[in-house]
Image (cartoon, helix red, strand yellow):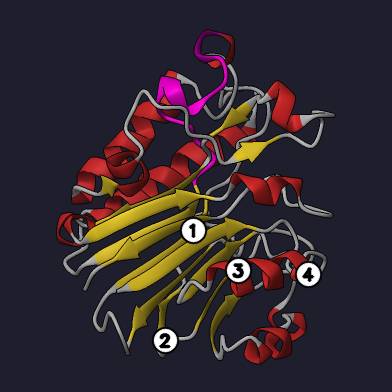
Amino acid sequence: MIKIASWNINSVRLRMPIVERFLKEQAPDVLSLQEIKTVEELFPYDAFNALGYTHHAVHGQKGYHGVATVSRIPLKEISRHNWQDNGEARHVGVELLGAGQGMVLENVYIPAGGDIPDREQNVKFGQKLDFLERMTRWADTVDRPTMIVGDFNIAPLESDVWGHKQLLKVVSHTPLEVETLKRFQDAHGFVDVGRQHIRDPERYYSWWSYRSKDWRVNDRGRRLDHMWASPELAAATVGHQVFEDCRGWEKPSDHVPLVTEIDL
């Protein structure tokens, strides 16, 4: 049995205290982080080593973006795809070498896409769609048991957002983004593990804006974070959890961690 966690941490150095708390309380075997916002040289390796997470794959960038996968299980980095096509650090892929040997874990931070859902008016929205199209071409070639996790910045289902009708023209829930994400999913046949265990139409959110003064009372959340798996891996999953309480911890990320358990 292995536990895989994913969390957009929104600056790993700033939020290392809550990362440490989460790792001590939940003890996942592997943790994939997005938006680490640091260069590789300044990543807090020592802090993770002290917690037993001595294996690292870090693709960093100063001040923005960046992804990292840390693990108690031996792993090796196998890829850094430039799906943004501009050199931004938004992906790192690893292969597990101990428990779960042979499993590939892809860690991705898909661009948010700006505020206007129109590529003619908003370059960032076009970049997001193009990023997903490059991912789709890659997914069509995947031939190993693979899990892809991270901040996808898209909430595809009506029950993934606090207000479906209110958000249909808001970036992250537009029909065009949902359709584009579905093409990526279908290219490999990825299974949405979160929704395999937390069935639609049950409410499922992973992000609440910092602008909301009382995020829990207002509960205007969206499911922007995902854990998807190849069919054979998805069939081996035995549990999936969303740790909403982390949103209320001191100096929190606006995202919360997800954890999937796999019986290999």
Decide: few, some or many residues near mark 3? Use Cα within 10 Å; few <14, some 14-19, many ≥20: few
Q: Position of residue 2 (x, y in %)?
A: 35, 73
* CB atoms of marks 3 and 1 within 8 Å: no
Disc 1 residue crowd, few under 14, some 14–19, many 20+, Cα 10 Å: many
User: SS for tag 1?
Assistant: strand
Return the residue at label 1.
108
Cα distance, mark 1 to mark 4? 23 Å
Residue at (50, 24) in percent of width and height: 173
Q: Nearer the viewer, mark 1 or mark 4?
A: 4
Query: Mark 3 and mark 4 in contact (Cβ < 8 Å)?
Result: no
Mark 3 is on which residue type?
Glu
Rendering coords of residue 159 (x, y %) = 44, 23
Q: Quadrant of residue 59?
A: bottom right
User: Does residue 253 appear left or right of residue 176 in this picture?
Assistant: right
Q: Which mark is residue 52?
A: none
Lower sequence index among marks 2 and 4 = 4
Disc 2 to disc 1, how far (Cα)? 20 Å
Residue that carries the numbered disc 3 in the rendered image? 25
Residue at 67%, 33% in the rendered image: 114
Q: Which residue is mark 2?
A: 73
